[in-house]
Amino acid sequence: MPPRFVLRVKSGSLQELLAEIRAKGGRPIQAFAPSHVIAVLPAGTQLDLGEISSQPDATSSSVTAHRTLATMESREAAGPEPTLSWDMPGKKPPMFHNDSPSACPAQASRSTAIRPAYKQLFDKIKSYCKKFSDKTKWSYKQKVSGRRTFRDGGTATGRYMVGRVAVALVIVGRQRGTDPNPPAEFLTTAERDAAATQISAGLGWLALEEPRARVEFVFDRTDIELAVVPSATTPDTFEDRESVWRDPALAKMGYPANAAGYARLAHDVRDNNGARWGFVIFVTRYPVHHFAYANAERLVVHYDNDGWGPSELDRVIAHQVCHIFGALDEYTSSGCTCTQRGGALHIENGNCRSCATDFVQCLMEANTFSVCDFTRRQIGWRSPLMASLGKALEAGSNADGRIEVFYIGIDDVLYHTWQLPRGNWIGEYHLGPSSPAKTKQFAVGRNEDGRIEVFYIGLDDVLYHNWQLVPNGKWIGENML
């Protein structure tokens, strides 16, 4: 892992510092408004607009930045931890919430008909969202091959996890009052800081997971205390429970006290931070229908994080943010199928635990810090949406004359891309068809019948080869030579 530093703005603005870091060959990972950044810097880099912050000061942005970096480094030093499926006995899984229409939904309801109780609100929100973006997709689950499957993923504020992503982090608790025993909904300053640290650490891991996507998360945090007392008679539904505290919190921030309010907040945090994408994270101790859920441009998490606990917020949030960008659940009790398609690119859910032929550990199935190839493509980690970075490259020629390029990525995976009949390129794929092959050296040859064959030395120093089954066709998979 490259060395990372906490930087603070010395002069100018946070956005200007981010631009200078990139211009000098560095890479911002997280930014904490208004003044701090975690970034990777080349050795000897001198900045004009920023300086290294060796110790936190009293500001929340400084405290969160330093604690986030310490948390990430501690996780990395500890090494892999036991992987637990999200639907393991005794625990509840975080979920994609599609029981009610969202503010600007791309995946809206369990049925193709809008529930009558929501119709008036839905129409108002739809009208509102049209004012903000003509790119918002209003699509629902459709039947494909007899099974319900996601038609689209992400919204106009979050379609591909590529580039700068702005996050409005809204932490909502109840006022302590004069009672010596604080109410159950109260959050201490330490707990608020701990939640912010866990969330930014989880997203920092996501940002580093795919260097080619150049993801950088910018956080704009707001802490809110309410006098609202929850009622035991509030119906136990997503919207009824959430609106009790969400609406007055949004009103305090100057936004409409309804779902349209967080839609507007998502757009504002995106635009104010010069980001491509933006969404809202609500953290609270008020009662919620489910401890963690996401849809459209917002996600909600209860601070206590159900049976997982606050120390696992980083993994839960990383999982939920992948939902924001269109990723599908893969754990068995989610009802996933391999025929589902998720994300704006409509990628199949081929790592669904109940049907995958070559299942691999993935954040969408368990509390693991790893992302499978299907999830990567669902959230947009696929060329040409992101840059292709490589260490070695060689070109081959198919039997029909189309060029095929092979290269070792900076993650040591052997990738290839090829021309389509009209001359354009299909995009990046690891050399399959199964798990990605990692290599340190390779060579490309062509058989007498026109089939391409690739020879490579694995990271284990074993010599492997992979070849096309037919000219211009699919690949057989990795075999020892």
Image: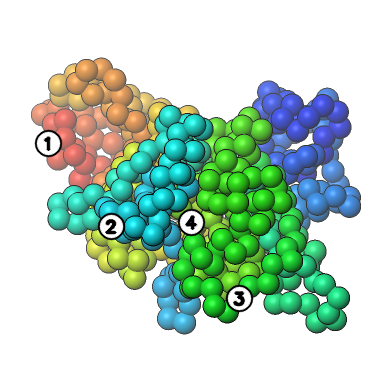
Q: Amino acid at mark 1?
A: Val
x, y (%) of residue 415?
37, 37
x, y (%) of residue 324?
47, 49
Question: Which is more N-terminal, label 4 or label 1?
Answer: 4
What SS does tag 1 mark?
loop
Q: Is residue 345 left or right of residue 217?
A: left
Instruction: Give the spatial CA distance, label 2 vs label 1.
Output: 44 Å
Q: Residue, x 49% and y 62% (percent of image)? A: 239
Query: Within 10 angstroms of label 4, few (less than 14), some, or many (20 or more) residues?
Result: many
Q: Amino acid at mark 3?
A: Ser
Pick whichever, 37 or 414, lies toward us. 37
Query: Within 10 angstroms of label 2, few (less than 14), some, or many (20 or more) residues?
Result: some
Q: Are marks 4 and 2 in contact (CB under 8 Å)?
A: no
Q: Are marks 1 and 4 in contact (CB under 8 Å)?
A: no
Which label sits on residue 294?
Answer: 4
What SS does tag 4 mark?
strand
Which label sits on residue 231?
Answer: 3
Pick whichever, 115 or 337, lies toward us. 115
Instruction: Give the spatial CA distance, label 3 vs label 1.
Output: 67 Å
